């Protein structure tokens, strides 16, 4: 009986001791934040090879993870940084085309990050670690996208589930954009948002999330200016994959079908409407709906035009979704209307025939005279 009582007391003491140890670890647990300014441009090329040195065991980012494993840590990680490290695990390019040194370093760092965080909670920062207050002010609808994409990408690279906690983690520091930079960010975001209504590709989703770089507190003035320009170029390249080819036309009939070419350089087919807005009332042309443009192709459409009066007119052609929302940049179609009235055409044709017959008769007379 004494033995059973002693064993019971020992178990109780062990239980409370273990509980106290776990609580102490929970209280004393450390939080490690893993972030770094972007080194990779939005076209995939790296601006420099400085990130490779930061990832070494003695580098700033290496010192964070080349440590003994603990159960009480919480990791707060920017998936944009991890994406850049992942890009370095295979051959990558520098803007100056110099030799790179980070493939093995990046592979080791990524493997160690997966190992060291395996027993801990991992919280995903919003992708690109933007200043969330600024993001909510400039683009409130994008904030959820930055958080969701950060969680998705970090989960994929670490090969495990991670946490999104908008109350605890909102991105560190503040960022300041001047009026020109703010306008550029807003325009790029608006154009990508519009295109996303009809095009859903991984590349487009990534570029939309990467605009968060522009709002990152980690950028200095020169860095921010570079990424503002780099983002605009990347957005132009992406938006131009779906477009209308503008042109000039001369119409000589009152009813004519004008050829209009639309182009889709994406890897997927796209369904759009074509909205046509005339600059005046000299013509009438209806919109074209439910156009399916195959992947990586050009498609020629027939635009029905009814000429009401001669002169010049312009048509603004715009690709839209089914609700009439623009999804690409507009194109200008310039029309020169030189339609001749039918009665005038018949009179002119008749006069030409009479003149031709007169010339023939005159020639016949000359031939007869020459024979006499």
Image (cartoon, rainbow, N blue to C red):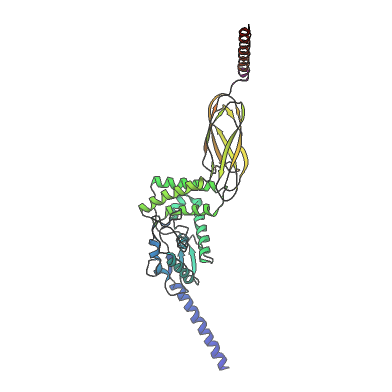
Q: Nearer the viewer, residue 264 or 24?
A: 264
**Residue 287 in the image: above or below residue 120:** above
On the image, the x and y values in percent for residue 241 come to 53, 46
> Which residue: 43% across, 45% down?
183
> Which residue: 57% across, 39% down?
261
Residue 341, magenta (yes or no) = yes
**Residue 179 in the image: above or below residue 302:** below
Instruction: Name the side, left or right, on which 15 lies relative to 30.
Output: right
In the orientation shown, which residue stands out farthest toward the front? 371
**Residue 229 in the image: above or below residue 370:** below
* Residue 327, quarter of the rendered image: top right
Q: Nearer the viewer, residue 272 or 135?
A: 272
> Which residue: 49% across, 56% down?
146
Q: Magenta residues, as a range?
A: 340-345
Instruction: Say whether residue 114 is visible.
Output: yes
Instruction: Name the side, left or right, on which 254 lies relative to 62.
Output: right
On the image, the x and y values in percent for residue 234 come to 46, 49
* Residue 335, quarter of the rendered image: top right
Instruction: Say whether residue 176 is visible.
Output: no
Q: Report the quarter where the C terminus lies.
A: top right
In the orientation shown, which residue stands out farthest toward the top? 372
On the image, the x and y values in percent for residue 177 come to 39, 49
């Amino acid at each position: 009986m004494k033995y059973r009582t002693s064993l019971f007391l020992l178990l109780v003491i062990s239980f409370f001791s273990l509980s106290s140890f776990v609580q102490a670890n929970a209280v004393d647990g450390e939080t490690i934040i893993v972030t770094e300014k972007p080194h990779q441009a939005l076209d995939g090329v790296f601006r420099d090879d400085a990130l490779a040195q930061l990832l070494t065991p003695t580098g700033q980012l290496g010192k964070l993870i080349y440590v003994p494993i603990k159960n009480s840590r919480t990791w707060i990680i920017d998936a944009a940084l991890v994406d850049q490290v992942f890009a370095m695990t295979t051959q990558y390019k520098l803007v100056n085309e110099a030799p790179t040194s980070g493939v093995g370093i990046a592979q080791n760092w990524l493997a160690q990050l997966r190992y060291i965080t395996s027993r801990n909670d991992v919280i995903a920062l919003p992708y690109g670690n933007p200043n969330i207050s600024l993001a909510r002010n400039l683009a409130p609808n994008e904030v959820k996208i930055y958080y969701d994409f950060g969680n998705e990408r970090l989960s994929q690279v670490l090969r495990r589930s991670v946490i999104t906690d908008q109350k605890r983690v909102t991105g560190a520091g503040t960022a300041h954009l001047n009026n020109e930079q703010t306008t550029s960010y807003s325009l790029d975001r608006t154009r990508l948002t519009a295109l996303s209504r009809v095009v859903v590709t991984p590349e487009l989703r990534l570029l939309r999330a990467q605009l968060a770089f522009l709002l990152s507190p980690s950028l200095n003035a020169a860095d921010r200016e570079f990424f503002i320009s780099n983002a605009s170029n990347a957005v132009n390249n992406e938006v131009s994959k779906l477009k209308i080819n503008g042109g000039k036309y001369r119409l000589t009939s009152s009813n004519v079908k004008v050829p209009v070419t639309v182009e889709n350089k994406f890897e997927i087919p796209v369904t759009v409407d074509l909205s046509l807005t005339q600059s005046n009332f000299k013509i009438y042309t209806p919109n074209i709906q439910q156009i399916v443009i195959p992947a990586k192709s050009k498609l020629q459409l027939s635009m029905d035009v009814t000429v009401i009066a001669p002169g010049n007119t312009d048509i603004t052609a715009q690709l839209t979704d089914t609700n009439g929302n623009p999804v690409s940049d507009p194109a200008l179609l310039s029309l020169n209307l030189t339609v001749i009235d039918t009665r005038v055409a018949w009179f002119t044709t008749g006069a030409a025939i009479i003149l031709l017959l007169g010339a023939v008769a005159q020639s016949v007379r000359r031939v007869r005279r020459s024979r006499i």
